[in-house]
Amino acid sequence: METSETPNLQEPVEQSFNSTIKPVKQSNSRNWLIAGVALIGTGLVVWQFWPKGAQPTGPQGPPATLVKVQTVQTSPVKQTSAFLGTLEAKQGVVLRPEIEGRVTQIFVSSGSRVSPGQPIVQLSPEKSQADFGAAVANINVATAASSNAQAQLRAVQADRGRAVAELDLQNTEFQRTQTLVKQGVLAKQVLDQVRRDRTSAQAALRAVDEQILAAKANLTQSRASLNQAKASALSAREDVQDTRITAPIAGMVGDIPIKLGSYVQAGDTLTTVIQNQTLELNLNIPIEQRDQLEVGLPVELNQAQSQQMLAKGRISFVSPTVNNESQSVLAKASFANPAGKLRDGQRVEAKVVWQTRPGVLVPTTAVTRLGGKAFVFIADQPQQTEGQVPAMVARQQPVELGSIQGNEYQVLNGIQSGETIVVSGLQTVRDGAELRLETDKPPTGKPPQ
């Protein structure tokens, strides 16, 4: 019986596998050794060429926040009240012609500065000059008539002198004759004749007196006619002068709605002249503040929309009475306007400065709000450690705010003068965060980016 042996396949397979695996293990060990040596060498090279003093010091915190800071100082704090109003010029006139006519010349333009008597507009003077010539002729006629009446009066006054002398003579003759008649020297018929002569003399004197009255009346009438002629001539001359419209006051010329060749009626508006060297503002002060109101209080004038400072003035008038309807006191503030920046009719906001005292002001950009409360970030300098200058650290500080003045808040409580606050970059600043000023260089403890 033949027996066949089964070959042992396990041993050759294991040997083959082992022979394959061993070289692979040896190869991997060498690769890892080479990689480790290379990594150590690279580290040595990086350490060798790293900037001196800039070697990594372990895990780094969040980067410092770039901000601007400002030192809080004591500043004047103003207690004010704001009022809206309209500026008014102290003097202003509307130029209107007294006569009708056509515009032949315009001497100025809108915005021009003029002095009293300076020509503004010229109207056509033809009709006015003709009327003036006629009025002058009437004066001459009336003057001649007045002279004739005066001559007549002098003539009748001379006649009266002769009549008076004649009457005196007749009175004397009558008395002498009457005496002689009584003595029987003369007949009664002679006395009757003398009486008739005396009566005629009296009648003649009365006639002369009537002529004098008539002459005086004629002279009065002629003089009245002369005066009327002179008045007419004066009016005509004024009409001639009225054809040239001049500035009654010094000031600035407003809008000129007319043009050359325009025909204007008496009373039409030609232009305006505004004296705006000084402007006034009417302020209605509530009665509760009347005890604080007095002449001389400072007033700051701001643009109503932009709050830009326009001018500074003072209270110039305080009414002694109270407005019953509004229960307010009228006050007027005056503002000098040498440069002409302010305008008549300009809408402005005026702040009456009741009191000025020292206080702390911070920019509005330095204030944040959280939960209805106001905060600022104080830039603290931590205690310095040996050999190291620490960075500034933000500390959130609640504050109590007062009134706002321009771009600053008054701080009533929370910070003091001399402290340093953060005024920019507040969106990224957190309590306890490290700060870096915009003028600072990046920290050397971190590698450059």
Image (spheres, rainbow, N blue to C red):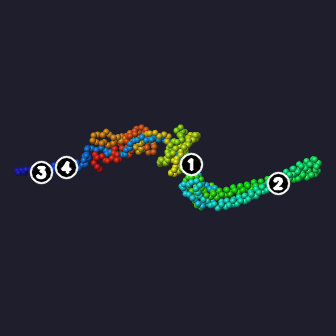
**Image coords of residue 2 (percent x, y):** 5, 51
**Identity, as a three-letter code, of the amino acid under mark 3:** Ser
**Image coords of residue 193 (percent x, y):** 91, 52
**Image coords of residue 271 (percent x, y):** 58, 55
CA gap between label 3 and label 1 equals 118 Å
Mark 3 Cα shell of 10 Å, populated few (<14), some (14-19), many (≥20): few
Q: Image check: 8 left or right of 91?
A: left
Q: Residue at x 19, y 49 (%)?
A: 41
Badge 4 element: helix
Badge 3 element: helix
Circles 3 and 2, Cβ within 8 Å, touching? The answer is: no
Q: Earlier in the sequence, mark 3 or mark 4?
A: 3
**Image coords of residue 326 (percent x, y):** 56, 41
Q: Which residue bears the numbered disc 2? A: 162
Q: Which residue bears the numbered disc 4? A: 41
Q: Which residue bears the numbered disc 1? A: 90
User: How many discs mark residues in the rendered view?
Assistant: 4
